[in-house]
Image (spheres, rainbow, N blue to C red):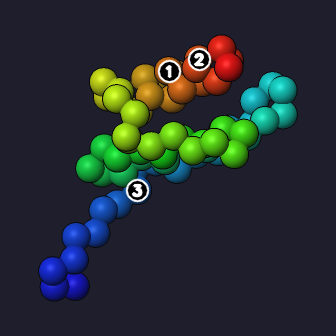
Amino acid sequence: MYGTINHMVLLRERVLTESGELLEIELHDDLRYRLAWRGVVFTEQRKYAFRSVEQLRYDFERDVEKA
């Protein structure tokens, strides 16, 4: 495709928490991310010091537990 930049999804995960709620995590190759919980979507617009997929998921799940 000429003139179009395609980005790959590196990770797409759905996690069912112990309380039965669904967490959705998506990470693209350009490090854009999308996190969703209780119908609220968080994107890369929120400042976050990205270190690794594992740390992103851990931090998000920790934030969810606090909410």
The percent coordinates of residue 20 (x first, y second) are 84, 34
Which residue is pictured at 30% across the width and 62% down the height?
7
Give the mark toward the camera: 3 or 2.
2
- In the displayed structure, would residue 12 be above or below residue 19? below
Which quadrant is the N terminus positioned in? Answer: bottom left
- Whole-angstrom CA distance, mark 1 to mark 3, is 20 Å
The percent coordinates of residue 9 (x first, y second) are 40, 56
N-term-proximal mark, 3 vs 2: 3
Q: Which residue is mark 2?
A: 62
- In the displayed structure, does residue 19 sit left or right of residue 39? right
**Contact (Cβ within 8 Å) of mark 2 with mark 1:** yes
Which quadrant is the C terminus positioned in? Answer: top right
- In the displayed structure, does residue 23 sit left or right of residue 57? right
Q: Which residue is mark 1?
A: 59
Which residue is pictured at 35% across the width and 60% down the height?
8
Find residue 23 and name its label. none
- Whole-angstrom CA distance, mark 2 to mark 1, is 5 Å
The percent coordinates of residue 19 (x first, y second) are 84, 26
Q: Residue furthest left?
A: 3
Secondary structure found at label 1 = helix
Query: Residue flagged by tag 1: what amino acid is it?
Result: Asp
Q: Residue furthest right?
A: 20
Q: Which residue is mark 3?
A: 9
